[in-house]
Image (cartoon, helix red, strand yellow):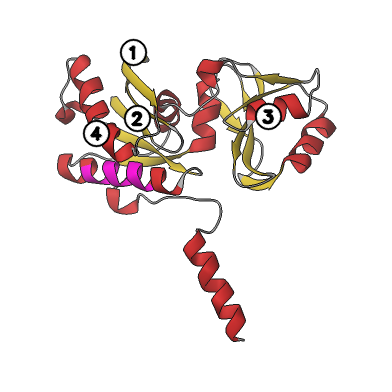
C-alpha cells in the first residue's frame, strides 16, 4: 500500500510517500520555513507524488501528524488531509507527533524520549521502547515540566535517546552520560516518521480525523477564565 505522510506540526513542513510492501520511501520533501504551511504543503504533496511516478489516485491511505504541535500548523495539515481524503475517497489517519518523532529514530534499539516545546518550562513528551523495527509507548503522552521529565529519566536508570525541538536544550541543560541526542536528521518532525507510524494504524473516514492538542487552546482558556469571573 502507498501511504502519503504529511507533517505541518512545527517549523518544518514535510511530505513523504512510503510503499509498505517494499518498505521503501519513494519520495520525500521537507522545508524548514517561516512561511505559512498552507503555502507550501500542497505543492510539496504534488511534487513527491509526481517524483515517484505516481498519481494521487494510487494512494492507499494518508497519514498526518495531528498533535501536539503548532495550533495553526496542525489545523492546516489536518484540513489538507481531510480534503484529499474526501476528494479521493481514500482512508486517512491521525498520528501523534511524538510517535512520529520516535519513529524517525526507530533504528535506535532502546529507549526513545520525544520532547517538544510547549510553553515556558513545559514540554510535550512521551517515552518509547524501540527494538529497531517497531515502537512501543511506555507511558501516556503528557505535558510536564522539564525538571519533572529529567527526574523521571534519571530515576529510570536507563540510557535514553532524546529527540524533538525541545531535545537540544534539554540535552545541554541536563547533561548526563545516560542521555543521548538524536542526530540532526532525526531530531525534528518529519513526514517519514508519520508514514512509519501510520503504516500500523487503521485508516478511517476523514470525518473521524481530529486535531489532538494535549492542552486547551487559548480560546478555551479565555472562555473558562471569563466563566470563573462570573461566579
The CA distance from mark 4 to mark 1 is 26 Å
Name the dominant secondary structure of the magenta segment.
helix
Assess whether mark 1 and mark 4 are in contact (beta carbons under 8 angstroms).
Answer: no
Quarter in which the C terminus is drawn? bottom right
* Helix, strand or loop under label 3: helix
The CA distance from mark 3 to mark 4 is 32 Å
Tell us which disc is closer to us: 3 or 4: 3
* Helix, strand or loop under label 1: loop
Q: Which of marks 1 and 2 is nearer the N terminus?
A: 2
In this view, the residue farthest toward the front is: 34
Residue at the spot x=27%, y=42% of the render? 80
* Helix, strand or loop under label 4: helix
Residue at the spot x=47%, y=64% of the render? 219
Q: Is residue 70 magenta?
A: no
Q: Is residue 22 left or right of residue 58?
A: right
Residue identifier under label 1: 22
Residue identifier under label 4: 42
Q: How crowded is mark 4: few (under 14 residues within 10 Å), some or many (20 or more)?
A: some
Q: In this view, does 215 lie above or below 229?
A: above
Q: Which of marks 3 and 4 is nearer the N terminus?
A: 4
Toward which corner of the image does residue 102 lie, by quadrant?
top right
Q: In this view, does 174 lie above or below 86?
A: above
Q: In this view, does 192 lie above or below 127?
A: above
The CA distance from mark 4 to mark 2 is 12 Å
Residue identifier under label 2: 5
Q: Earlier in the sequence, mark 4 or mark 1?
A: 1
Res 193 seen here: yes
Q: Which mark is residue 169?
A: 3
Assess whether mark 3 and mark 2 are in contact (beta carbons under 8 angstroms).
Answer: no
Residue at the spot x=28%, y=41% of the render? 81
Q: Which portion, as a residue range, is magenta?
A: 75-83
Amino acid at each position: 500500500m502507498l501511504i502519503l505522510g504529511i507533517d505541518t506540526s512545527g517549523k518544518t513542513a514535510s511530505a513523504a510517500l512510503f510503499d509498505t510492501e517494499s518498505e521503501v520511501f519513494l519520495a520525500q520533501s521537507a522545508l524548514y520555513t517561516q512561511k505559512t504551511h498552507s503555502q507550501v504543503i500542497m505543492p510539496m504533496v504534488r511534487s513527491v507524488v509526481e517524483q515517484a511516478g505516481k498519481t494521487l489516485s494510487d494512494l492507499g491511505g494518508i497519514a498526518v501528524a495531528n498533535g501536539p504541535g503548532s495550533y495553526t500548523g496542525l489545523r492546516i495539515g489536518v484540513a489538507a488531509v481531510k480534503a484529499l481524503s474526501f476528494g479521493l475517497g481514500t482512508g486517512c489517519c491521525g498520528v501523534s507527533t511524538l510517535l512520529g518523532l520516535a519513529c524517525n529514530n526507530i533504528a535506535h534499539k532502546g529507549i526513545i524520549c520525544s520532547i517538544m516545546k510547549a510553553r515556558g518550562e513545559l514540554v510535550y513528551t512521551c517515552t518509547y521502547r524501540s527494538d529497531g523495527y517497531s515502537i512501543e509507548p511506555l507511558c501516556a503522552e503528557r505535558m510536564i515540566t522539564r525538571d519533572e521529565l529529567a527526574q523521571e529519566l534519571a530515576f529510570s536508570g536507563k540510557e535514553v535517546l532524546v529527540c524533538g525541538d525541545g531535545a537540544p536544550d534539554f540535552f545541554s541543560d541536563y547533561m548526563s552520560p545516560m542521555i543521548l541526542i538524536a542526530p540532526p536528521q532525526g531530531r525534528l518532525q518529519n513526514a517519514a516518521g508519520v508514514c512509519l507510524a501510520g503504516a500500523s494504524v487503521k485508516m478511517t473516514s476523514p470525518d473521524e480525523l481530529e486535531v489532538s492538542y494535549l492542552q486547551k487552546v487559548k480560546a478555551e482558556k479565555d472562555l473558562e477564565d471569563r466563566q470563573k469571573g462570573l461566579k
